[in-house]
Image (tube, helix red, strand yellow):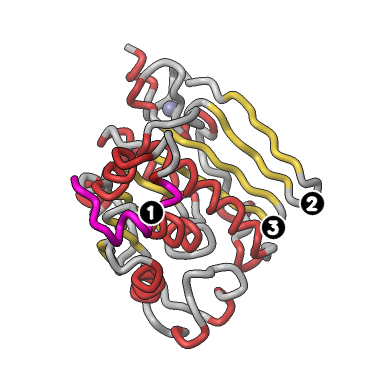
């Protein structure tokens, strides 16, 4: 793929990097990423991936922009309250980079549409806020053999990992890490527990970096590792996550 004159300018700071260059930029432009959720994590994901020139961005969300979202969901704006989040995100992305294609899916991800949707993308970034979606994506991405860059937020903490369990030994899935979801009443969500908005920005931005690394094939993948961020202590921790040979999702990939 030949870059246009405008693309040489737009992506100039990528092109001078040995790790990206014209070849890497062409990879980004040809890539298709699905972002699940256009909220606190999805906002920085979409904005940075669009700015980086990820050629096609899918976004799925069934919600509308609410005033209480704006404290952290920076893809949205005060004059778009009431608008579908996927449409608001489309406008934000188009304002940054009109070259990229955005595929807006105003729907809830479920067992009925996950496989068909994931099949159309190279990689999935999970910016959802519930365990049902996390496990659904874990199983569907494993079945499809697609990388899943997943994150979770707490009021002053975040977690991040990349899951490529289809690669076999050394590559766990989310279910190897957390076999079962905790009971719903034990899981506070942003709406009820609150969150320091910028924490979502830190984790969503780290997620965008990992997505770009996976597409470019550079650096060290987070697969097999969980990264934890403690905002109040200003600390990052990394722990190794072993693959569970008895994992109901990916255990068989060791056979
Ligand atoms: Zn597993």
Q: Are marks 1 and 3 in contact (CB under 8 Å)?
A: no
Q: How far across and down, in percent of the image, does residue 199 sit?
A: 65, 57
Nearer mark to the viewer, of 1 and 2 = 1
Q: Residue 59 or 24: which is nearer the viewer?
A: 24
Q: Earlier in the sequence, mark 2 or mark 3?
A: 3
Q: Residue at x 61, y 63 (%)?
A: 190
Q: How far across and down, in percent of the image, does residue 177 sit?
A: 53, 31
Q: Residue at x 32, y 45 (%)?
A: 25
Is 85 part of what is drawn in magenta? no
Identify the residue under disc 1: 11
Task: Answer above or below: position of 219 versus 105.
Answer: above
Q: Quadrant of the N terminus?
A: top left
Q: Which residues are magenta?
A: 1-14
Task: Answer above or below: position of 233 versus 241.
Answer: below
Identify the residue under disc 2: 232
Q: Is residue 220 visible?
A: yes
Give the distance between the C-alpha atoms of the residues marked 1 and 3, in whole angstroms: 35 Å
Q: Residues within 10 Å of mark 3 (few under 14, many from 20)?
A: some
């Amino acid at each position: 793929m030949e870059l246009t004159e405008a693309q040489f300018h737009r992506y100039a700071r990528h092109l001078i990097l040995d790790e990206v260059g014209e070849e890497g930029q062409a990879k980004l432009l040809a890539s298709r990423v699905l972002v699940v959720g256009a909220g606190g994590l999805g906002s920085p994901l979409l904005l940075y991936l669009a700015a980086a020139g990820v050629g096609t961005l899918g976004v799925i969300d069934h919600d509308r922009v609410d005033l209480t979202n704006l404290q952290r969901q920076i893809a949205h704006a005060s004059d778009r309250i009431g608008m579908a989040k996927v449409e608001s995100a489309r406008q934000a992305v188009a304002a940054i980079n009109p070259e990229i294609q955005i595929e807006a899916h105003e729907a809830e991800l479920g067992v009925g549409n996950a496989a068909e949707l994931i099949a159309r993308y190279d990689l999935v970034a999970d910016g959802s806020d519930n365990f049902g979606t996390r496990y659904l994506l874990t199983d569907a991405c494993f079945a499809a053999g697609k990388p899943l860059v997943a994150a979770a937020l707490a009021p002053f903490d975040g977690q991040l990992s990349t899951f490529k369990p289809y690669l076999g030994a050394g590559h766990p899935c989310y279910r190897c890490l957390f076999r079962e979801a905790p009971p719903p009443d034990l899981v506070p969500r942003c709406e009820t527990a609150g969150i320091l908005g910028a924490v979502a920005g830190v984790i969503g931005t780290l997620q965008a970096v990992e997505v770009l690394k996976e597409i470019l094939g550079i650096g060290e993948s987070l697969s097999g590792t969980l990264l934890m961020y403690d905002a109040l202590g200003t600390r990052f921790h990394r722990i190794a996550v072993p693959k569970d040979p008895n994992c109901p999702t990916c255990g068989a990939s060791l056979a």
